[in-house]
Amino acid sequence: MSTPRMAIKRFCGTLRVLGSGLRIGASEETAGLGEVDGPILRHPVTRVPYVPGSSVKGKIRCLLEQQSPEYKPLDEGGPCSCGKCTVCQLFGCGSTANTVTPSRLVFRDCQPTEHTMSVWDRAGVDSEIRTHVSISRTTGAARKGALAVMERIPAGSDFNFSFSLRTFEGDDVPKYYKVLAEGFELLSKHYLGGSGSRGYGEVLIVNEDGTPMHEHLRKLAEAG
Ligand SMILES: [Zn+2]
């Protein structure tokens, strides 16, 4: 069998944290001593907050699958494992046994932009600590032991964003753009990271010319 001809297209832009901040949690073992209960993910050496590409990729995939009639997971709630649908082609098949084609997307980790780093430097902080309490339904006061201290990336922070799409001869590339456009738009309407129902995680990913990534991809899909 001959190897299919391959092309890689890279998309660069910015992931903007809007609204009330973004929380990508780290396990407490990886946080420093004396830090909050719910620390955010940081670079292990520089301690600078970042947004893993896998978080963006996983969230977009999940949102697409939640609305896809083709979604066929191996286990309840798992990623699609059919190996044939557009989501499996783009993001990879959830089952090695059913894998018939290589996955086409790579999402890079997102590091803060230079501007955001200088804003954090001037402010002397790179995260915000939020305290959440659970209110007792009988007394109306905070319940005992119901205090949660959460860390998040402040709203207004920008991260360098990039992903690449690998395509092979015979691929329906406009369809890939259309599905990806849908995924990016769903992400902008939903949330990234944790505590979305508390308003965290409102993000917008824009292309390098400043247009929302979903609009850029939709134009590419229409151009064919
Ligand atoms: Zn599938």
Image (cartoon, rainbow, N blue to C red):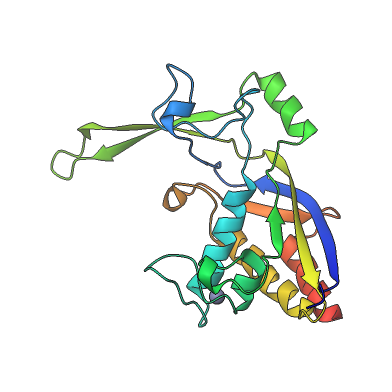
Give the image quarter of residue 77. Answer: bottom left
Q: Position of residue 30 (x, y in %)?
A: 48, 28
Give the image quarter of residue 106. Answer: bottom right
Q: Indicate left or right for 154 with 33 as reference.
A: right
| Residue at 65%, 72% in the rendered image | 89
Q: Which quarter shows the C terminus?
A: bottom right
| Residue at 66%, 72% in the rendered image | 101
Q: Position of residue 161 (x, y in %)?
A: 73, 48
Give the image quarter of residue 58. Answer: bottom right
Q: Is the residue 122 above or below the residue 215 in the image?
A: above
Whereabouts is ligand 1, in terms of quadrant? bottom right
Q: Position of residue 51 (x, y in %)?
A: 62, 42
| Residue at 73%, 79% in the rendered image | 175
The answer to whether residue 1 is seen in the rendering is: yes
Task: Specify the farthest residue to the left.
Answer: 138
Q: Indicate left or right for 58 with 107 as reference.
A: left
